[in-house]
Amino acid sequence: MRIVTRADFDSVVCSVLLYEALDIKAPVKWVEPHEMQKGQADVQEGDIIANLPYNENCSMWFDHHYTNQVDKPFEGDFKIVPSAARVIFEYYKDKFQRDYSTLVRQTDKIDSADLTQEEVLHPENFPYILLSMTISSRDRSDSPYWDKLVDLLRKHEFDSVLGDPEVRDRCKVVIEQNRKYKTFLEEYSRMEAHVSVTDFRPLEDAPSGNRFLIYSLFPESVVNVKIRYDSENPETVIVGVGHSIFNPHCNVNAGLMLSEFEGGGHHGAGACNFHISKADDYIPRIIDILLKNEINE
């Protein structure tokens, strides 16, 4: 029995909850959503998938993404709620020996981007948000760190987790990354009507940083499109779309739209990965849909 999930804060907390609720001994299998969507992930009988698209080989599935809904019976649970961790927390509510309510509540807040301007501009002052920013799926060599966070959050109080030397060092790195990221966003972003477009393709290494900051820098935008090359495969383009959390007037269901471009996600945010040869077709079409801003439920 393995947990199969992705690398983000919601998934780390999903793993904490599943380890605590079930007798799981195997390490987490970390995969990306596009690997699931394209049948590239090794999913086996007995696996528990969390926060990823359904795979018929699994034994249980827990998710909350709009575009991942299935119309077949399965073991587990699916709900449109702020986080996949919330789905698991409610499903196994009588199985936990420790109180994870605060951790899950903070995961809801972070995964649904229910943040204030102050939290976006100064995440270093908000420990749960800062910790979440130390987790990035862009470098798979970080998987030992993701495993470590799962173990720390299972066994220790949150202040003790932040006091771990590696966690503390990574938080310092994130603070510095965010400072530099602001400059990159300002240089490589443009406005097209109510759509902000951040295109990092001219850069050899696309920067990473505070994913919410763009909404503070461009308050007139209702949605952001971020474009970059996959750091592990330069023949792959990654496009992320997110509704502004401060100017909530985007009518386009981001996940549903991106399901037409080899991706998916939530109503307010999603992503797609595709071969570089499709970029000149896909990207203008995505931006055009967002410029029209028509309801597409």
Image (tube, helix red, strand yellow):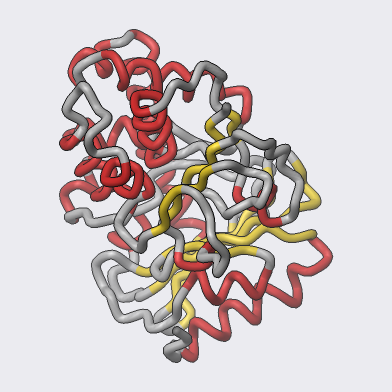
- Residue 156: percent from left, percent from top: 24, 14
Which residue is most to the top?
Answer: 165
Q: To which quarter of the image does residue 258 belong?
A: bottom right
Q: Nearer the viewer, residue 267 or 80?
A: 80
Q: To which quarter of the image does residue 19 belong?
A: top left
Q: Nearer the viewer, residue 101 or 186?
A: 101
Look at the image and tell me in which quarter the N terminus lies.
top right
- Looking at the image, is 124 positioned above or below residue 108? above
- Residue 242: percent from left, percent from top: 43, 65
Look at the image and tell me in which quarter the C terminus lies.
bottom left
Which residue is most to the right?
Answer: 277
Tell me the residue at 60%/34% (across/down). 46
- Residue 193: percent from left, percent from top: 43, 84
Residue 198 seen in this snapshot: no
Q: Nearer the viewer, residue 289 or 261?
A: 261
Q: Is residue 124 left or right of residue 241?
A: left
Q: Nearer the viewer, residue 98 or 292?
A: 98
- Looking at the image, is 72 positioned above or below residue 179? below
Tell me the residue at 43%/44% (across/down). 181
- Residue 77: percent from left, percent from top: 41, 53
Tell me the residue at 20%/43% (across/down). 105
Tell me the residue at 21%/22% (across/down). 97
Residue 231 seen in this snapshot: yes
- Looking at the image, is 95 positioned above or below residue 211? above
- Looking at the image, is 188 positioned above or below residue 219? above
Q: Is residue 295 left or right of residue 90?
A: right
